[in-house]
Image (cartoon, rainbow, N blue to C red):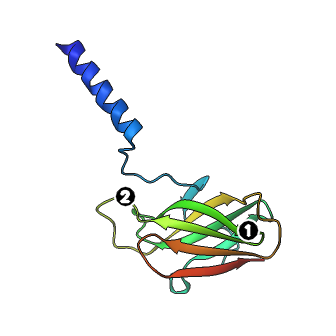
Amino acid sequence: MKRWRISSIGVALAVCVLAGCSATPASVAYATRSGVPAGLDADPLSGPAVTWLEEGETFATVTWGSGSCPPVPTILSPEAMNRLAVTFAPSPNDPCTADMAPITHEFELPDEITDHPVTVEIRYEDRPESVALVLE
């Protein structure tokens, strides 16, 4: 009986994984951490921010919101040789703290981006507005 139960759980888990049952959207950032990168002057009233981590190689976006429910960057899409978009999905976490915390998301610059300065458009899946910021 135990063997059947373990086997059933394994099969159910495999089906769920193959069918994409995960409620957590996959992040396209190589790192996400709380706080603001050194040298970046950002505040919640100004909205999201962007900065180079290593110019021409890696960059970071800073979003503001609940520290326990940060948005998840799900799409990083080059749109021109000097323009890209980062789309954020709502956090799958619940409940969320009622604070206003900065969250830094770090990305590798796509190979298709070859011109500077780079415009980074911040988009949200659950909001119609977007914000265009420039990496100089």
Q: Is residue 43 visible?
A: no
Q: Residue at x 28, y 19 (%)?
A: 7
Going by the picture, which residue comes out furthest to the bottom? 45
Q: On residue 94, which mark appears?
A: none
Of 89 and 96, which appears nearest the observer?
89
Residue at the extreme right of the image, as rendered: 115
**CB of mark 1 within 8 Å of CB of mark 2?**
no
Q: Please tell me whether residue 126 is drawn above or below residue 23 in the rendered image.
A: below
Query: Looking at the image, which is closer to me, 84 or 40?
Result: 84
Residue sitting at 72 percent across and 59 percent down? 110
At x 34%, y 37%, the residue is: 16
Looking at this view, is 38 or 87 the one in front?
Answer: 87
Q: Is residue 92 left or right of residue 74?
A: left
Q: Count of labels shown?
A: 2
Amino acid type at mark 1: Trp
For the C terminus, give its image quadrant: bottom right
Indicate which label's residue lies in the foreground, 1 or 2. 2
Instruction: Inspect the image, locate mark 2, and give the three-letter code of the amino acid beneath it.
Output: Pro
Mark 1 or 2 closer to N-term? 1
Identify the residue under disc 2: 92
In the rendered structure, the answer to whether residue 4 lies left or right of residue 22 reads left
Disc ID at residue 52: 1
What residue sits 61% from the left and 61% below the top? 76
15 versus 105 height, above or below? above
Disc 2 on helix, strand or loop? Answer: loop
